[in-house]
Amino acid sequence: MEKIKKFIEHVGNATLLFLQAVWISIKTPPKPRHIIKHMYDIGVTAAPLIAITGFFTGGVLVVETYPTFHKFNAEFLIGALVSLSLARELSPVLVALLVTARSGSAIAANIGTMRITEQIDALEVLAVDPIRYLISPRLIAAVVMIPALVILSYASGILGGYFVGTKIYSINPYLFVEKMKDLTELYDILGGLYKSIGFAIVIITVACYFGYITKGGAEGVGRSTTTAVVVASVLVLILDYFLTALIY
């Protein structure tokens, strides 16, 4: 019973924190330089990692599916399979999990350290709103940059699939591209982007919330960071199911 009560309390407090961050972003938007800094941290520095992961994900899709498609002389459809798999599911989820592990942990640790060293209390004393300064810029940056990373992951995944399919398995390049274009609709790609916006909100809200409520010194920071990453990763996978059912 106590655990259920604590769970509901955490959900309510995290939701309130998110709504406050949204309201502050509309009412008194954060300074552009703060948003750009977090866009760089969340998006630009993660781009090489996302591109490499996307490339090999596209490649492994071809390796896994080629034997089955070959049995039915349907190798030319592998391009469409790679495109749809990446656009609808793999790119949004992989990017969300990588950003959670990379940026989510850093955000939780950063805000948690500020909490235990009383820097957040100092901001309040100086009449600086901690939510406007710490959370709103990160939320805006993530909502912009995570969909951009999904597009990068999708593009690099297509390149990886094309390279492995045409160079290693000798699939006809023209048919690979044409079937991919015929069977992939803009709606499929947009669906993945809508999902990534939902994931961005969840990741930043959870990371900021657990960093914000940190207590217990250095050990508390480690505990908050671990909890934030685990909770955000699980919520991304749960939310993925519901968004997929809703969108597609």
Image: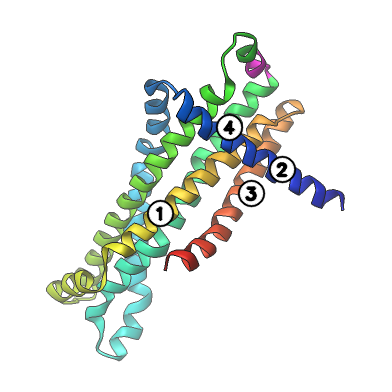
For residue 20, the mark is 4
Q: Secondary structure at mark 4?
A: helix
Q: Secondary structure at mark 2?
A: helix
As shown in the figure, which amino acid type bears the numbered disc 2? His
For residue 231, the mark is 3
Q: Is residue 119 magenta?
A: yes
Question: Nearer the observer, disc 3 or disc 4?
Answer: 4
- Upstream in the sequence, badge 1 or badge 4? 4
For residue 181, the mark is none
Splitting the image into 4 quarters, where does residue 160 fall? bottom left
Question: Nearer the observer, disc 4 or disc 2?
Answer: 4
Q: Secondary structure at mark 1?
A: helix
Q: Which residues are magenta?
A: 117-121
Q: On the rendered image, what quadrant is the C terminus found in?
A: bottom left
Q: Mark 1 — residue?
A: 194
- Upstream in the sequence, badge 3 or badge 4? 4
Q: Residues within 10 Å of mark 4 (few under 14, many from 20)?
A: some
As shown in the figure, which amino acid type bears the numbered disc 1? Tyr
Q: Is residue 236 above or below residue 219?
A: below
The residues bearing labels 3 and 4 have C-alpha atoms spaced at a distance of: 21 Å
Splitting the image into 4 quarters, where does residue 226 fall? top right
The residues bearing labels 1 and 3 have C-alpha atoms spaced at a distance of: 21 Å
- Upstream in the sequence, badge 1 or badge 2? 2
Foreground of the two, 161 or 170:
161
The residues bearing labels 2 and 3 have C-alpha atoms spaced at a distance of: 11 Å
Q: Residue at x 50, y 30 (%)?
A: 136
Q: Residue at x 35, y 36 (%)?
A: 44
Q: Position of residue 19 (x, y in %)?
A: 57, 37
- Could you tell me what secondary structure mostly forms the magenta stretch? helix
As shown in the figure, which amino acid type bears the numbered disc 4? Gln
Q: Position of residue 152 (x, y in %)?
A: 30, 50
